[in-house]
Amino acid sequence: MEARGPSNFQTAPISKESENDQFHLSPHPLADVFETMDGLAFDGLKQSILDSGLLEPITTYQNKILDGRNRYRACVENRSCNAL
């Protein structure tokens, strides 16, 4: 089933050519509905992304992360991800 919604929602992968690029996304205020991950859960997410790549896309709205801010942060910290 195809997802439907406003046409201004976008999904990653977002291309980043090198770690020297200054590309940065910040969370959308609506993303605050969800808690951020930390500790062992976040470490597990980072390892999962290293092992398997980013499996769920990062959704942006108004050029900010609506869904996937933990995945995005894990990718940034890993410096290795198909979303960056």
Image (spheres, rainbow, N blue to C red):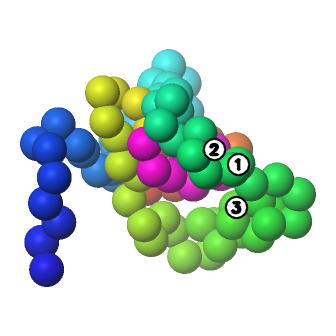
Q: Residue at x 47, y 31 (%)?
A: 28
Image mark for residue 73: 2
Based on the picture, tell me whether residue 4 belongs to the magenta stretch. no
Mark 2 / mark 1, whichever is N-terminal: 1
Mark 3 / mark 1, whichever is N-terminal: 1
Q: Residue at x 69, y 50 (%)?
A: 35
In this rendering, is residue 38 above or below 26? below
Name the side, left or right, on which 13 lies relative to 35: left
Residue lying farthest right?
A: 39
Element under disc 1: loop
Whole-Å distance between the Cαs marked 3 and 1?
13 Å
| Residue 55 in view (yes/no) | yes
Where's residue 31, x and y in %? 52, 41
Magenta-colored span: 66-74
Name the side, left or right, on which 9 lies relative to 33: left
Residue lying farthest top?
A: 22
Main SS, magenta residues: helix
- The quadrant of the image that shows the N terminus is bottom left
Residue position marked by numbered label 1 in the rendering: 36
